[in-house]
Image (spheres, helix red, strand yellow):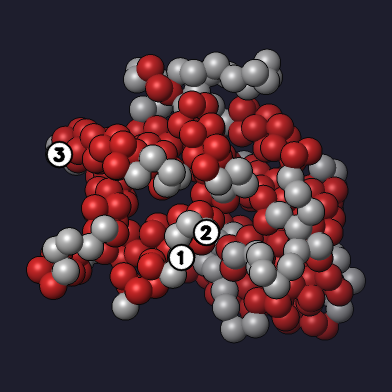
């Protein structure tokens, strides 16, 4: 079934990247690829999914600092380079290398010290990013990987990166939600939460939310926004007291939901669902203020 799904996906690179990422996440927690290889050893998708699995395991082991983290990272990076040679038109190997860049916060590897033409942005894994977007110009994963990289390695560059992206976006692009992720991260990093609980009622957060909403309204059924981006938009609209618009987005989400940003902005991650339900109820009730938390 997974093979058939992938067969019908490429070369729609955005969808291809998303599906291989999801399948890689699932496969990283099981031995499903070993079973697949026994049944269909010559399947062309297997090697790429194995790269996805190696990258996910490298990120997981790197996050907890286990002894084998360095070895797993090396294997994942080598597999990604091999995949880039085997599949020269595919953005996924470059997305994998970009994902691994976060494991080199000191930028010791030369591919993580490339300059860019924007003087506001520091040297970083720009070549990896450029290779990915050369194959898929508005790759959601590439942009989010780069955002997460700067948030982890040098947070001031995260906002500059997002600002450099926004003027180039086509109408309806889900990348218009990138600034909403900045707002959530700003809240997450703030030690005194009470001082920023109302930030979504102030600039630049209000303008970020309005621009994202307008971009979503300009999107098409052929290019729907991912659930994670819609969840960030629903939260931002609710938190900025734009209740009617928040209802529109909640209705577009229907029965689907993402744990984020709710798990980040709730008092504790285990209250994410409760927090989301409160926002949902307040939006539909048309409450004048969204800050009843």
Q: Quadrant of the N terminus?
A: bottom left
Residue ID at (35%, 33%): 103
Residue ID at (55%, 68%): 258
Please, what secondary structure does the residue beneath circle 3 have? loop
Q: Quadrant of the C terminus?
A: bottom right
Residue 40 location (% of width, % of height): 16, 69
In the rendered structure, find residue 68 and report the number of the disc placed on it. 3
Which is nearer the eye, 292 or 65? Answer: 65
The answer to whether any part of residue 289 appears in the image is no
**Which residue corresponds to mark 2?**
12
Which is nearer the eye, 133 or 113? Answer: 133
Instruction: Report, in whole angstroms, how far the alpha carbon at label 1 lies from the one at label 3.
Output: 35 Å
Instruction: Report, in whole angstroms, how far the alpha carbon at label 2 lies from the one at label 1.
Output: 6 Å
Residue ID at (20%, 38%): 75
Residue ID at (65%, 82%): 254
In the rendered structure, find residue 9 and report the number of the disc placed on it. 1
142 w.r.t. 237: above or below = above
In the rendered structure, find residue 41 and report the number of the disc placed on it. none
Residue 130 location (% of width, % of height): 53, 32
Instruction: Report, in whole angstroms, how far the alpha carbon at label 2 lies from the one at label 3.
Output: 36 Å
Q: Are marks 2 and 1 in contact (CB under 8 Å)?
A: yes
Please, what secondary structure does the residue beneath circle 2 have? loop
Q: Earlier in the sequence, mark 1 or mark 3?
A: 1
Please, what secondary structure does the residue beneath circle 1 have? loop
The answer to whether any part of residue 12 appears in the image is yes
How many other residues sit within 10 Å of disc 3, few (<14), some (14-19) or many (≥20)? Answer: few
Q: Earlier in the sequence, mark 2 or mark 3?
A: 2
How many other residues sit within 10 Å of disc 2, few (<14), some (14-19) or many (≥20)? Answer: few
């Amino acid at each position: 079934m997974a093979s058939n799904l992938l067969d019908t996906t490429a070369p729609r690179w955005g969808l291809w990247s998303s599906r291989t990422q999801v399948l890689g996440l699932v496969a990283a927690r099981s031995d499903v690829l070993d079973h697949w290889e026994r049944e269909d050893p010559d399947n062309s998708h297997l090697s790429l999914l194995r790269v996805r699995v190696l990258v996910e395991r490298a990120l997981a082991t790197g996050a907890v600092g286990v002894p084998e983290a360095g070895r797993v990272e090396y294997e994942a990076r080598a597999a990604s380079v091999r995949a880039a040679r085997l599949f020269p038109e595919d953005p996924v190997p470059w997305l994998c290398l970009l994902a691994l860049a976060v494991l080199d916060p000191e930028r010791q590897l030369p591919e993580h010290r490339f300059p860019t033409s924007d003087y506001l942005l520091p040297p970083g894994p720009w070549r990896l990013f450029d290779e990915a977007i050369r194959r898929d110009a508005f790759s959601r994963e590439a942009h989010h990987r780069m955002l997460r990289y700067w948030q982890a390695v040098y947070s001031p560059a995260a906002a500059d990166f997002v600002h450099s992206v926004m003027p180039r976006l086509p109408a309806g692009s889900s990348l218009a939600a990138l600034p909403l992720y900045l707002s959530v991260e700003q809240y997450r990093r703030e030690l005194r939460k009470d001082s920023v609980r109302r930030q979504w009622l102030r600039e630049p957060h209000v303008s970020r939310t309005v621009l994202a909403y307008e971009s979503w309204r300009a999107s098409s059924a052929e290019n729907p926004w991912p659930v994670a981006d819609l969840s960030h938009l629903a939260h931002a609209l609710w938190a900025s007291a734009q209740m009617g618009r928040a209802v529109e987005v909640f209705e577009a989400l229907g029965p689907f939901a993402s744990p984020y940003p709710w798990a980040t902005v709730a008092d504790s991650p285990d209250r994410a669902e409760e927090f989301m339900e409160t926002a949902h109820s307040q939006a539909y009730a048309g409450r004048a203020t969204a800050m009843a938390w």
